[in-house]
């Protein structure tokens, strides 16, 4: 098929600035590239923080890394699907939120390709950086070499599929790092999309009880539909909060605490809640200068395991897809994308998401 001469992207010029639509030229995909017509891009909390200037990001900024789309053109030597199947024009796909320059020590020896030197992300580059179309807030996206592409099954609708390559895959990695075992108890700090998927995954891994902490009443009310047995306001009197948690996490407290609220001040509370020998996994404090004061002696004395998860291993993307396919009838994942906006209304979508008027806003280019 012939390509149009250009495609629109929504960019902002300064932090917290308005979005404007810009046309950038389209070219046939180069060797190893795949060109996709974006279907949906959901707004991750990190998109909001970048737009607000709380995370470093170049301008004019092109955001959006939770993306799905249909292939419109394949470059010479284009990669196969992660499972080894050939890709074809028309396939609906998702792909890793990041790409790497090539093999290096982190990927080849340490099995941490997500931390490879020179790693970069879709929706994290300036719109002026060629090939310009490298984010979800636009009509097209070039999937560049050294990305991981996954063809999507028809059983998933777009709302179920779009968060896979960031939110869901990240929580697969987080719960893997937590090593949740059958019969364990889990506390999740934050009941946004990450926390709700984390609760569902924890239950699927065999958790006996999942407790969610969030200051938003609507999020607490929704949580019971995603595997949360008890949802509490973390601002409760700490003695009362601990008593309620211990009632479900007998005899000595939760085995696992997961932080996905993005608030560094929640970390001392998480350390306090954990039983001796427990595990704490941080997945939400992605902003620089997330400084917090804590009693490090508690980590030592309670013999805690502390893990941080940033990005995810490529295998987690396949696992995320398999989890959602297997459990979509148990949990209403499609409801989590609760706001839809055309490309012309990216500014409205960002404002609504930032104000938590919607849980996950979707851009429909």
Image (cartoon, rainbow, N blue to C red):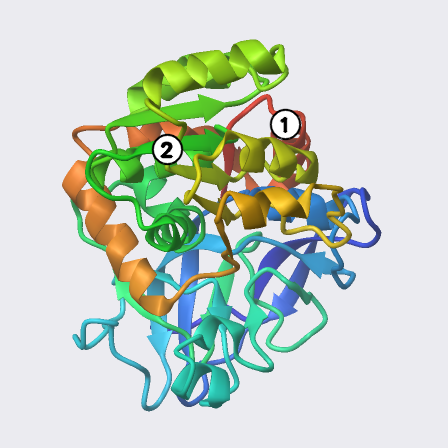
Image position of 114 with respect to 311: above or below: below
Please report contact status of discs 1 and 2: CB closer than 8 Å, yes or no. no
As drawn, is 125 to the left or to the right of 363?
A: right
In this picture, residue 175 sits left or right of residue 56: left
Instruction: Name the side, left or right, on which 322 lies relative to 240.
Output: left
Of the image marks 1 and 2, the number of the one nearer the N terminus = 2
Position of the N terminus, as image quadrant, is: bottom left
| Residue annotated with mark 2 | 186
In terms of depth relative to the viewer, which is nearer, 47 or 188?
A: 188
Which of 108 and 207 lies nearest the eye of the viewer?
Answer: 207
Quadrant hosting residue 277? top left
Residue 194 x %, y %:
45, 39
Q: Answer with the quarter of the image where residue 336 lies.
A: top left
What residue appears at the point 74 percent right and 43 percent down from the top-left corner? Answer: 292
Q: Nearer the viewer, mark 1 or mark 2?
A: 2
Residue found at x 47% / y 40% = 258
Q: CA distance from mark 1 to mark 2?
A: 30 Å
Q: How many discs mark residues in the rendered view? A: 2
Look at the image and tell me whether residue 28 can be seen. yes
Q: Could you tell me which secondary element the residue under label 1 belongs to?
A: helix
Q: Which residue is mark 1?
A: 352
Circle 2 crowding by C-alpha within 10 Å: few under 14, some 14–19, many from 20: many
Q: Which residue is more in the foreground, 286 or 300?
A: 300
Residue that appears at 15% across and 42% down: 326
Q: Which mark is residue 249?
A: none
Q: Whole-percent x and y of residue 111?
A: 39, 78
Q: Which image quadrant is residue 250 in?
A: top left
Residue at point 84%, 52% (across, down):
14
Asked if one can make out residue 92 in the rendered structure from this viewpoint, the answer is no
Tell me: residue 267, above or below residue 243: below
Q: Position of residue 310 (x, y in %)?
A: 53, 59
């Amino acid at each position: 098929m012939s390509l149009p001469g250009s495609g629109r992207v929504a960019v902002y010029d300064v932090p917290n600035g308005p979005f404007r639509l810009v046309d950038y030229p389209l070219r046939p995909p180069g060797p190893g590239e795949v060109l996709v017509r974006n279907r949906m891009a959901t707004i991750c909390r990190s998109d909001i923080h970048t737009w607000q200037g709380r995370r470093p990001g170049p301008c004019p900024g092109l955001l959006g890394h939770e993306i799905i789309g249909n292939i419109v053109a394949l470059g010479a030597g284009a990669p196969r699907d992660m499972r080894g199947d050939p890709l074809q024009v028309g396939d609906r796909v998702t792909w890793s939120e990041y790409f790497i320059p090539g093999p290096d020590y982190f990927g080849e020896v340490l099995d941490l390709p997500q931390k490879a030197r020179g790693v970069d992300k879709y929706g994290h580059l300036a719109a002026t950086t060629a090939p310009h179309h490298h984010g979800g807030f636009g009509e097209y996206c070039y999937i560049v070499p050294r990305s991981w592409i996954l063809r999507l099954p028809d059983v998933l609708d777009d709302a179920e599929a779009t968060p896979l390559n960031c939110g869901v895959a990240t929580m697969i990695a987080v719960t893997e790092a937590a090593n949740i075992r059958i019969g364990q108890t889990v506390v999740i700090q934050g009941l946004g999309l990450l926390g709700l998927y984390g609760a569902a995954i924890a239950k699927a891994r065999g958790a006996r009880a999942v407790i969610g902490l969030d200051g938003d009443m609507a999020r607490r009310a929704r949580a019971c539909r995603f595997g949360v047995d008890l949802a509490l306001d973390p601002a409760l009197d700490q003695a009362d909060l601990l008593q309620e948690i211990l009632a479900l996490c007998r005899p000595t407290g939760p085995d696992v605490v997961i932080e996905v609220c993005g608030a560094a001040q929640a970390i001392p509370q998480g350390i306090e809640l954990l039983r001796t020998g427990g595990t704490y996994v941080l997945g939400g404090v992605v902003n620089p200068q997330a400084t917090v004061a804590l009693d490090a002696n508690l980590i030592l004395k309670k013999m805690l395991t502390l893990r941080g998860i940033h990005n995810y291993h490529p295998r987690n993307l396949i696992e995320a897809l398999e989890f959602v396919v297997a459990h979509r009838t148990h949990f209403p994942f499609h409801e989590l994308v609760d706001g839809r906006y055309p490309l012309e209304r990216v500014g409205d979508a960002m404002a609504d998401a930032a104000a938590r008027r919607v849980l996950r806003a979707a851009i429909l280019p």
